[in-house]
Amino acid sequence: DAKTTQPNSMESNEEEPVHLPCNHSTISGTDYIHWYRQLPSQGPEYVIHGLTSNVNNRMASLAIAEDRKSSTLILHRATLRDAAVYYCILRDLNSGGSNYKLTFGKGTLLTVNP
Amino acid sequence: DSGVTQTPKHLITATGQRVTLRCSPRSGDLSVYWYQQSLDQGLQFLIQYYNGEERAKGNILERFSAQQFPDLHSELNLSSLELGDSALYFCASSPRQGGVGELFFGEGSRLTVL
């Protein structure tokens, strides 16, 4: 699996935007960029995914660099409930069932201050 | 609520014993994945089943085994337990075998081996 690099931790204030970066310089043309988060004492939760274009959903936005070597997860207004570990994961669309699994790295621990 | 149910939520046992963790996927999901999360190793993929058949294997020990039954629920069997097997075990499900899209995780089973 192609590797991703994320900062170990980030801090934000409540109701401010948060930009969580992810580097994936070895990304291939068929790798989708996925983001999951894990709240304390819970299982991971899907946030968003994309291939080339920027994506928006009710939880967040995903901004993908033109060369696809990096991406940024954007939480538009952080809340205390957004405090979690955020994982950036690459998943190859064409690798078939054996690579449908997610390979988690260390992720970024996001702290949200009231 | 992801729709994935795991039982038991907590389990305490002794070294050398055997335990079974159970997972009921979301209604209609055919794929089930098992993950182990320990403090030092992070989230590690163990094994994937699709419609009753094993599809992918990760870092699963020989002392561990899993199966998916005709009703699509899955069980993870851990035997000859060691202290190092203490961890959170997560089950996830998805509708398909491959491609992109989200995995839905349960809340996990916390295993403590004394």
Image (cartoon, helix red, strand yellow):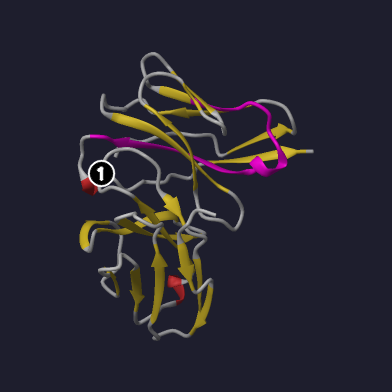
Indicate whether residue B51 is drawn in magenta.
no
The image quarter in which residue B31 lies? bottom left
Q: Which residues are magenta?
A: A72-93
Q: Residue furthest front?
A: B28
Rendering coords of residue A89 (x, y %) = 40, 38
Indicate whether residue A80 is drawn in magenta.
yes
> Residue at coordinates 36% horizontally, 15% vertically from top-left?
A67
In the rendered image, which residue does mark 1 sit on? B98
The image quarter in which residue B46 lies? bottom left
Rendering coords of residue B68 (x, y %) = 28, 67
Rendering coords of residue B19 (x, y %) = 40, 80
> Residue at coordinates 34% horizontally, 67% vertically from top-left?
B73
Q: Residue furthest right?
A: A114
The image quadrant where one finds the N terminus of chain A is top left
Rendering coords of residue B90 (x, y %) = 44, 61
The image quarter in which residue B53 lies? bottom left
Q: How many neighbours does mark 1 have within 10 angstroms: few (below 14), some (14-19), or many (20 or more)? A: some
Q: Is residue B88 above or below residue B10?
A: above
> Residue at coordinates 27% horizontally, 27% vertically from top-left?
A28
The chain under label 1 reads B
Q: Amino acid at mark 1?
A: Gly
The image quadrant where one finds the C terminus of chain A is top right
> Residue at coordinates 29% horizontally, 75% vertically from top-left?
B63
The secondary element bearing badge 1 is classed as: loop
Q: Is residue A108 above or below residue B97?
A: above
Q: Is residue A30 above or below residue B46?
A: above
Front in this rendered view, residue A113 or A36: A36
Front in this rendered view, residue B27 or A85: B27
